[in-house]
Every structure is written in structure tokens, then in C-alpha cells.
Image (cartoon, grey):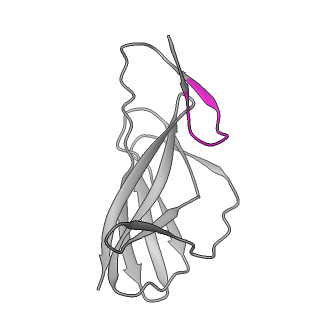
Amino acid sequence: MKIVKVPSNDDVGVITVGTPLEVELDIEVKPRKGELVLWVSNPNTVKVETSNEVELYEYVGYWQRLDPGIVFVKRRIVLIPGETIEQKLPLDLPPGRYKVVKFAYVKGAKVRVEKEFTVR
């Protein structure tokens, strides 16, 4: 058994040795006038937890984290296999290259999931 300490002040997870941590979230992003719409899907065969929190980055020669001015009330969301949720953020982004980051939680471990997109 291996103990995994996840970043920040999050929980500690326990993962069996030899078992690679495999989890995915499919994220689709569509910028619309005045909002950013995310569809988050669970393509796994097991339940996956995520949260309503979103990190937003803009590429300016390097990935710079943006402060969208949105306060997220930390809330865990359980996605059953095949389930998709929609999340709308009230953002009007100028043209550029961006990425969103969400986190999936499996067996107490935190896994970072990113999706790049372009606003034209």
C-alpha cells in the first residue's frame, strides 16, 4: 500500500501499490457572448467526484492563471459513469488561447484535468 499526499490542504488518499491511478473527465468548452459553458463528462466505469471549482489560464507565452472574479462555493459533485453536467461561468473573454482546469477525486487522490480552447 502506498500513501499519496495530494497538494494543498486536501485529504490523503491510499492507493494500492501497482495500481496506476487512472481517471478521466471529458471537458468540452464553448465560449458564448457573456459566458463560458463547460460540459464535464465521466467516461470511466466507476463514479468520479469533481467540484464546481474551475481554474482559468490564458496563454501569453506561458500559462498565466486568471482571476475570473467568481467565488466558488466548494461543493463536491458525484458523476456516475456516462453522466454529463453543464456549468456556466459569467465570463466575456477577449480573443486568445485559454485552458480550464478541473479536478477529479478518486480514492481520496486529486487528479488534475485540463482542456485548452481558443476564443476567436
Dominant secondary structure of the residues highlighted in magenta in the image: loop
Residue 72 vs 25, above or below: the answer is: below
> Please, which residue is most extreme toward the front here?
61
Residue 96 pos. (x, y %) = 33, 81
Q: Is residue 96 left or right of residue 108?
A: left
Closer-to-camera residue (7/120): 7
Residue 56 pos. (x, y %) = 48, 67
Residue 4 vs 64, above or below: the answer is: above
Residue at 37% across / 18% down in the picture?
19
Residue at 45% across / 72% down in the picture?
37
Q: Is residue 118 left or right of residue 17?
A: left
Residue at 35% across / 60% down in the picture?
115
> Please, which residue is most extreme toward the right here?
73
Q: Determine which quarter of the picture holds residue 14.
A: top right
> Please, which residue is most extreme toward the top here?
1
Residue 75 pos. (x, y %) = 67, 52
Instruction: Say whether residue 46 is magenta.
Output: no
Q: Which residues make up the magenta segment? A: 5-13
Residue at 39% across / 28% down in the picture?
21
Closer-to-camera residue (44/71): 71
Work out which quarter of the rendered image holds the C terminus and state it.
bottom left
Residue 8 pos. (x, y %) = 62, 43
Residue 64 vs 15, above or below: the answer is: below
Please count the marks in the image: 0
